[in-house]
Image (cartoon, grey):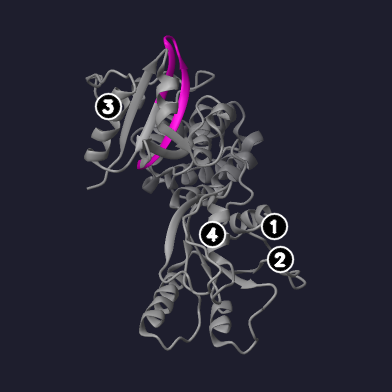
Amino acid sequence: MGGIAVIVVQGPDAGAVVRRVFRPHRRPLESLEPDRLCLGSLVDGGEVLDEALVTFTPAPDGTRAEINIHGGPRIAQRALLLLEREGAAVVEPDPLGPIDPDHWPLAAGGLNNPAIGRELLQRLPRAMTAGVVTCLTRQWSAGLSRLARDAMEDPGARAEDLAAAAERYEAMRVLLAVPEVVLAGPPNAGKSSLANALAGRAASIVTDQPGTTRDWVRTLADLGGPPVWLTDTAGLWAPDDPIDRLAVDRAWQRVDRADLVVAVFDASAPPAAEDPHWTRLLAERRVLVVAGKIDLAPAPPGVLGVSARDGQGLADLRRAICRRLGAGDLDGDAPAAFTERQAALLATAAIVARQGEAAQARALLTELLEGGEGSAAAVEQP
């Protein structure tokens, strides 16, 4: 049975203890800024206990490290025993109970925004990468909250900014939705190598033999914008073997459910125009065509080319995926609604502010920050 556990390690040796049992997937812990999340593995000797998100924060008595795992009670117990063996003392949690945003310290700058705080707490469990966590928390400590408070002085002067913050809700929704990006195409097109390169770790088996992937493999990937479920699939062709046919059928199932399909082909052996599988793939409603293995041959004109072997084009592909998903241009520091309630209040406040109804705009902005008897359902466009 799964769940989420947060283990806090605090004290003068907390950083050293956690570093002995945590292996980051990408960046070294030494380069990690305070309060930034790092994805990696919690390890006991040579055994990986679980994937974990770890963050370090300065504390009065040294360092505070938070370890977020999701493997269930048994894994949490093993993690505690592991930390105890490394020198940590296991103590009972603080009995004060859950945090109520009404009793939080005010956000930076003295902003009174408990309503945004509640919505932040509700959505943080859905924030799957450090970038999304940062984007959300900035809306409470600055971004959205600061814009609403500043607009109180002269709503008409900030009407366009309020409207822009409302429009950014769609991009924020994508960040929290964790869309599925499916890599599909002919056998031996380099899909598995590309999936591993995008994810930053070896999630799919890669060999020189065509057809290595017999079933789809899904992994969470941080593309520098929205986190995505990156799904590697079996090659699309017409096999005789029933097991191979089942693998192809399951690949099409993932394609049909995808938020975005990355259609990958080998640049040195592009599919024939009459290939029925390639034709069907290109007919998908949301498809991004990519030429792989451009270290062996150049991409055709107008087609994005990548090489998982030497990294050519990977940054361009990440940006292209983010743009196609609708979150490519989102600035993490920009004020942005991250709930429907916020978007509705901001959009309505912008309209009445343009009409010179400053008092009504201020009431809507107060509702945005502090909450009250109103609700998103009660907000109507004038």
Q: Mark 4 Cα within 10 Å, few/some/many (few <14, many 20+)?
A: many
Q: Earlier in the sequence, mark 2 or mark 3?
A: 3
Element carrying mark 2: loop
Q: Earlier in the sequence, mark 2 or mark 1?
A: 2
The Cα–Cα distance between marks 2 and 3, rounded to whole angstroms, is 53 Å
Q: Earlier in the sequence, mark 3 or mark 4?
A: 3
Label number found at residue 98? 3
Q: Answer with left or right where residue 48 lies relative to residue 291.
A: left
Region of the chain picked out in magenta, as a range:
48-65
- Is residue 54 covered in magenta? yes
Secondary structure mostly taken by the magenta-highlighted segment of the chain: strand
Residue drawn at point x = 44 percent, y = 73 percent: 251
Give above or below for 90 relative to 293: above
The Cα–Cα distance between marks 2 and 1, rounded to whole angstroms, is 9 Å
State the image coordinates of residue 140 (x, y, percent, origin top left): 48, 30
- What's under tag 4, amino acid-wise? Ala
| Residue linked to disc 4 | 195
The Cα–Cα distance between marks 1 and 3, rounded to whole angstroms, is 46 Å
- Is residue 302 covered in magenta? no
Residue drawn at point x = 67 percent, y = 52 percent: 315
| Residue linked to disc 2 | 294
Which image quadrant is residue 324 in?
A: bottom right
State the image coordinates of residue 339 (x, y, percent, origin top left): 44, 44
